[in-house]
Image (tube, rainbow, N blue to C red):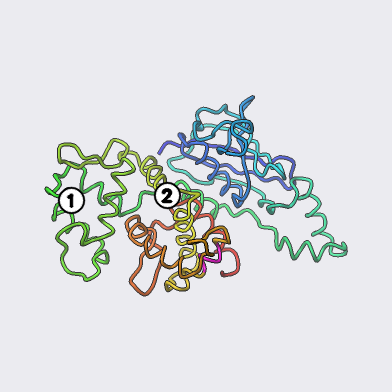
């Protein structure tokens, strides 16, 4: 993977907060936003913008239209100049000077850095300076209150930041890699449009738990996650059927593009997309859970925004929704369910950036 090296400096704070990171050279601005968040240590709780000369980019906002900024999804890192500003939290106005210093290493990661990330909502650079002053003075009248609010200010942890940044870039799930490899030379589907038995059996050999009874599978529906995976890969444009032969598309030759397309499967602002992220993050941070406990934790995180048939969403509703998602979760190696217990899958921290960030945050915090 070709990478570019960025030097990121948070303005007007002391001690200095600096990160040197290698990111995919073709990162879109939404992807770059996710990477800058985890590199510095923010929690992605506020609006952001990229300021490049006289152009400003940000996420689409239906309340502002194009008055606030241009749509960032239309731009990539190579479209920006070698120096630009990343602005986070338009209230506290944290501004980061970003410089493209050259080519990066063989893969993404955090190369160097200094300074812990300020707490969210502390009032920007001036508020942070005041907070540090109060925390340094045990005799200050607000010391106890500020210590309780802020806790111990975090130090910069390069290995942890490096790992989280690489997880945020993402990896191709093993299940996806397996099926793409099996279909690399093209496979003729059955008259009913299903994968042939030879492919089904090879997948079952790798994922025996995908058959609820453990008996030899004959058709892809015997391995429900396989049927779901087949449908997902065709829907996101990683598999194409032509003249009865199914084979990977050109996009499937690029790992970064595979991850992008898989992520496009999830609607980030819709209920099922949000629930998938929360389910994956909870399991990654907490370890194996039974269905009731998983649903209870996810329900507490969803808030009061959601309802069913005019009534408030319950933990039982969430458990039912998670069960409905089980095929997708298994197909993409996000979570595994054995009828009694749920546990995080191999891709739990490498496919959904928000899930990786939440799991890392909760793993450093008191157990939920």
In which quadrant will I find the N terminus? top left
* Crowd around label 2: few <14 · some 14–19 · many ≥20 (10 Å): some
Residue 299 included in the magenta stretch of the image: yes
The residue under label 1 is 194
What is the residue that sits farthest to the front in this orientation? 310
Which image quadrant is residue 202 in? bottom left
Which image quadrant is residue 81 in? top right
Q: Is residue 18 above or below residue 354?
A: above
> For the residues marked 2 and 1, what is the alpha-carbon distance in whole angstroms?
24 Å
Residue 349 horizontal side relative to residue 152, left or right: left
Viewer-nearest residue: 186 or 253: 186
Instruction: Name which residue lies at 62% across and 36% down.
Output: 64
Residue 348 horizontal side relative to residue 120, left or right: left
Image coords of residue 300 (percent x, y): 55, 66
The residue under label 2 is 266
Which image quadrant is residue 160 in? bottom right
Q: Is residue 344 above or below residue 77?
A: below
Instruction: Name which residue lies at 17% across and 53% down.
Output: 199
Mark closer to the chain start, 2 or 1? 1
Which secondary structure dominates the residues rendered in magenta?
helix
Viewer-nearest residue: 317 or 71: 317
The secondary element bearing badge 1 is classed as: loop
Residue 226 included in the magenta stretch of the image: no
Image coords of residue 352 (percent x, y): 45, 52
Residue 150 horizontal side relative to residue 300, left or right: right
The secondary element bearing badge 2 is classed as: loop
Viewer-nearest residue: 199 or 25: 199
What is the residue that sits farthest to the top in this orientation? 54
Count of numbered circles on the image:
2
Q: Which residues are magenta?
A: 297-301
Image coords of residue 31 (percent x, y): 50, 41
Image coords of residue 60 (percent x, y): 55, 37
């Amino acid at each position: 993977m070709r990478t570019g090296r960025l030097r990121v400096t948070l303005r007007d704070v002391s001690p200095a907060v600096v990160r040197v990171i290698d990111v995919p050279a073709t990162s879109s601005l939404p992807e770059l936003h996710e990477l800058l968040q985890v590199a510095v240590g923010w929690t992605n709780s506020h609006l952001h913008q990229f300021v490049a000369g006289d152009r400003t980019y940000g996420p689409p906002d239906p309340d502002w239209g194009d008055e606030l900024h241009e749509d960032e999804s239309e731009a990539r890192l190579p479209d920006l100049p070698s120096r630009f500003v990343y602005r986070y939290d338009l209230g506290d106005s944290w501004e980061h000077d970003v410089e493209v210093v050259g080519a990066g290493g063989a893969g993404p990661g955090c190369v160097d850095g200094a300074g812990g990330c300020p707490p969210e909502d502390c009032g920007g650079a001036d508020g942070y300076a005041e907070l540090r002053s109060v925390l340094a003075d045990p005799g200050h009248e607000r010391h106890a209150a500020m210590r309780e609010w802020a806790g111990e200010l975090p130090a910069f942890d390069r290995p942890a930041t490096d790992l989280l940044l690489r997880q945020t870039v993402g990896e191709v799930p093993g299940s996806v890699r397996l099926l793409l490899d099996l279909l690399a030379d093209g496979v003729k589907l059955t008259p009913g449009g299903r994968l042939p038995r030879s492919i089904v059996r090879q997948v079952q050999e790798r994922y025996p738990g995908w058959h609820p009874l453990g008996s030899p599978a004959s058709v892809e529906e015997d391995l429900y996650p396989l049927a779901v995976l087949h449908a997902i890969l065709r829907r996101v444009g990683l598999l194409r059927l032509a003249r009865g032969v199914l084979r990977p598309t050109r996009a499937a030759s690029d790992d970064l593009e595979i991850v992008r397309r898989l992520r496009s499967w999830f609607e980030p602002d819709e209920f099922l997309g949000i629930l998938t992220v929360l389910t994956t993050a909870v399991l990654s941070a907490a370890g194996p859970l039974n269905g009731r406990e998983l649903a209870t934790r996810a329900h507490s995180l969803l808030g009061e925004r959601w309802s069913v048939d005019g009534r408030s969403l319950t933990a039982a509703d969430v458990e039912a929704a998670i069960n409905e998602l089980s095929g997708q979760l298994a197909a993409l190696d996000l979570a595994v369910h054995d009828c009694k217990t749920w546990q995080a899958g191999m891709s739990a921290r490498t496919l959904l950036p928000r899930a990786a960030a939440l799991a890392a945050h909760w793993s450093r915090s008191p157990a939920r």
